[in-house]
Every structure is written in C-alpha cells, then in structure tokens.
Image (cartoon, helix red, strand yellow):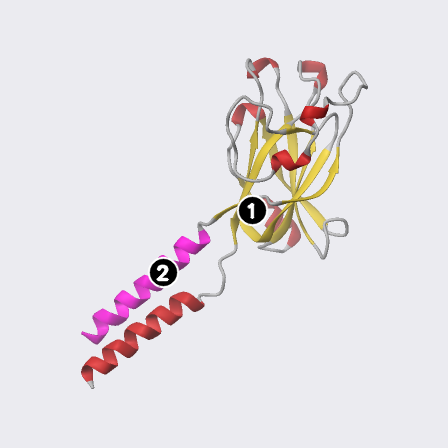
C-alpha cells in the first residue's frame, strides 16, 4: 500500500509540474516603444499608435485594438515574471492578408532593465502565420540561458513587395511562464504521507 501511495504522490508532483509549466502569460507592461513612420514618411495614424493595445489577451478580430510598429519600429514588452520555451505573437491585418504581408523579428532579452538587457533573436513572424508559437531553442543556445524577461518585436516588413503602409500590427504577445519551485506539489505529497502515517499509527 505504501508503494502505491508513493507512486500516486509522485504522479501528483509530475502532474502539478506539467500543469504549472504550461501556464500562459500575456504581456502586461510596455517597456519601450519606438514607432517608425509610414512608408511614405508620414506619421502612423493616432488610433494605431497606442502601445498599450498590445497588452493583455489577444482579441483576434478585425478591429483597431492593436499597435502598428511603423517602418522598422519596435516594441518591448514584459510579463511580470520570467518565461521559457516559446513566445507567441498575435497580429491583426485587415483582409486581404496576402496583399498586406507584414513581418517582424522577435527577440528575447534578459537583464536588470529592458534598456540595459541583452537580446537574442528568437525567430521571425509573418502575419499570414498569425499566432504560431516561436521556439526559444535558438535563443537558449545563443545566450546560454533557459529563461528570459523581455520580448522585443521589430518591424521587418518588405515594403517594396507589400501594400502595407505602417508595418507589423501587434495585437498581443503570450509566453510560457517559468514554474515556481514545486513547494505546493511537495507540500501535497507531504500531506499524503502524513495522513498515511496517521492511519497506520
């Protein structure tokens, strides 16, 4: 019986760890925003220029609840905690998307502040593949790290071949949080073992 109890307890730890590692966290702070101009050298429309529109969960609809980066513009976000494994960027483009191809490079960073952090390229995104997770494996190898603090998105739209005028439009960004130390899971196991000991006493 003790063996079965221990196996069940270990299973609870594994389940708790898996559940914790799968937690999705949305960006909650704009660390920096450097908006570029439109490709005709005029400012981006005001209703597309609020970086706070990139915070929180993705709306996934064709309304102006995003921020446009502008030509070569950038946006840096944080999440209130460290993250690992992958980053997902959600973009909004009004149809027809195949005529308004927009692209961005996605970097992840770590440091005391966003301004002083070091950044590594995680991957590139295109609006026609909106919401596809980006693995952080390449950034982990390049940095020697497994956790990061910031996401920086830089517009790389090719305006010569796209009808886009104001670049990549960020709706939202999500990451996978770093699990807290397994204190809760271990405490649960401890409780199970104590209960078992009392019943045997």
**In the orientation shown, which residue stands out farthest toward the right?**
41
Of badges 2 and 1, the one in the foreground is 2
Rendered image quadrant of residue 120: top right
Up the image or down, 120 lies above or below 190; here it is above
- 132 or 171: nearer the viewer: 171
Judged left or right of residue 186, residue 150 is right
Badge 1, how many Cα within 10 Å: few under 14, some, many 20+? some
Name the N-terminal-most of marks 2 and 1: 2
Question: What kind of element bears circle 1?
Answer: helix
The residue range painted magenta reads 1-21
Determine the main secondary structure of the stretch shown in magenta.
Answer: helix
Residue found at x 72% / y 35%? 74
Residue 134 at x, y percent in the picture:
54, 39
Residue found at x 23% / y 73%? 3
Q: Which residue is mark 2?
A: 14
Judged left or right of residue 77, residue 12 is left
Residue 85 at x, y percent in the picture:
52, 48
- 24 or 28: nearer the viewer: 28
Question: What kind of element bears circle 2?
Answer: helix
Q: For residue 11: magenta?
A: yes
Q: For residue 120: magenta?
A: no
Which numbered disc covers residue 66? none
Residue found at x 36% / y 64%? 13
Residue found at x 52% / y 27%? 129
Which numbered disc covers residue 137? 1
Residue 165 at x, y percent in the picture:
70, 17
- 179 or 198: nearer the viewer: 198
């Amino acid at each position: 019986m003790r063996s079965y109890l221990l196996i069940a307890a270990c299973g609870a730890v594994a389940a708790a760890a898996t559940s914790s590692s799968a937690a999705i966290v949305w960006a909650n702070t704009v660390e920096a925003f450097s908006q570029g101009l439109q490709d005709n050298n005029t400012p981006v429309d005001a209703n597309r220029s609020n970086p706070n529109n990139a915070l929180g969960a993705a709306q996934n609809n064709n309304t102006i609840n995003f921020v446009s980066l502008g030509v070569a513009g950038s946006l840096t976000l944080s999440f209130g905690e460290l993250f690992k494994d992958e980053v997902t960027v959600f973009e909004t483009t009004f149809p027809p998307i195949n005529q308004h191809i927009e692209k961005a490079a996605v970097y992840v960073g770590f440091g005391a502040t966003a301004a002083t952090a070091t950044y590594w390229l995680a991957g590139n995104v295109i609006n026609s593949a909106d919401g596809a997770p980006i693995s952080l494996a390449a950034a982990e190898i390049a940095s020697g790290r497994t956790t990061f603090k910031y996401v920086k998105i830089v517009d790389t739209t090719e305006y010569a071949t796209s009808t886009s005028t104001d670049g990549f439009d960020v709706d939202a960004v999500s990451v996978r949080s770093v699990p807290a130390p397994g204190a809760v899971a271990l405490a649960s196991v401890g409780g199970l073992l104590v209960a078992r000991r009392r019943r045997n006493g």
